[in-house]
Image (cartoon, helix red, strand yellow):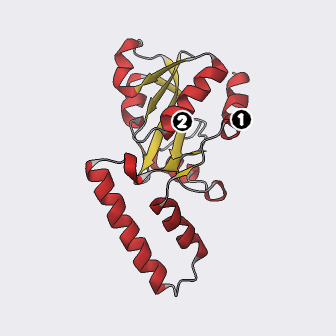
Amino acid sequence: MNAIIFDSNTGFTERYAKMLGEKTGLKVLNIRDKGSLPKGSEVIYLGWLNAGGVTGFKKARKYFNVKALCPVGLTPLDELPDKDVIKRYGLKDLPVFYLRGGFDMDKLKGLYKLLMKIMISMLEKNFKKSGNNDIYLKNRIDGMKNKVDFVSEENLEPLIDWYNQQ
């Protein structure tokens, strides 16, 4: 394994990448700096979930030999989105390790901030339609309106166990 490559928007994915780098001793690079590694290098890729996709993954897959994919998102661990990611990209043998990140509206910029405000508004309307009884929806809205941070070394343990077996 040559490096950990990541794409981060608000810093949660970058924090995971740096933690993983400390645990493994691997070099950590932003996808924008991909040219500093030879094409075909073996990497672990971390990207944030955006509309069901993992940002930068297609680019990373074309340039590197991605050995593991780590989508980072706000979805609770009991509702893992990894099956959707596997299906979306047609992954069969590539290990996928979902990492719960966080959300901070203040760190969003431009279009992403606008889209999230629209999404929160839509979710609030749906919550009202539910008679204010949908706890999952309430928790999701609260998580998007307030700063939440679920980044932890403990979340990396399955990935580190996999890495140590390589």
Which image quarter holds the C terminus?
top right
In the rendered image, which residue does mark 1 sit on? 157
Which element type, helix, strand or loop, lies under badge 1? helix
Name above or below for residue 87 compared with residue 136. Answer: above
Residue 143 sits above or below residue 33 on the image: below
* Amino acid at dot 1: Glu
Label 2 residue SS: strand
Quadrant location, the N terminus: top right
Residue at image coords 42%, 42%: 10
Q: Which residue is drawn at 53% across and 71% down?
A: 137
For the residue pair 96 and 33, the one nearer the viewer reads as: 33
Provide residue 82's location: percent of width, then percent of height: 57, 49
Front in this rendered view, residue 42 or 48 = 48
Q: x and y percent of residue 100 in the render?
A: 58, 47
Task: Place residue 155 in its image quadrant.
Answer: top right
Are the two marked residues, 2 and 1, in contact with CB atoms closer than 8 angstroms?
no
Please state if 102 lies on the left or on the right of 165 as rendered.
left
Mark 2 and mark 1 lie on one chain; the one further toward the N terminus is 2
Q: For the residue carrying disc 1, how many other residues have a C-alpha within 10 Å: few (<14), some (14-19), or many (20+)?
A: some
Task: Name the disc covering residue 53, or none.
Answer: none
Given this view, does label 2 or label 1 mark the residue nearer the observer? 1
Q: How far apart are marks 2 and 1 (CA)?
A: 15 Å
Q: In the rendered view, would you say 100 is above or below 64?
A: below
Name the outermost residue toward the left.
110
Q: Which amino acid does label 2 sit on?
A: Leu
Q: Position of residue 7 (x, y in %)?
A: 42, 34
Q: Position of residue 29 (x, y in %)?
A: 45, 22
According to the picture, the residue beneath numbered tag 2 turns out to be 69
Residue 105 seen in the current view: yes
Identify the residue at image location x=40%, y=67%: 120
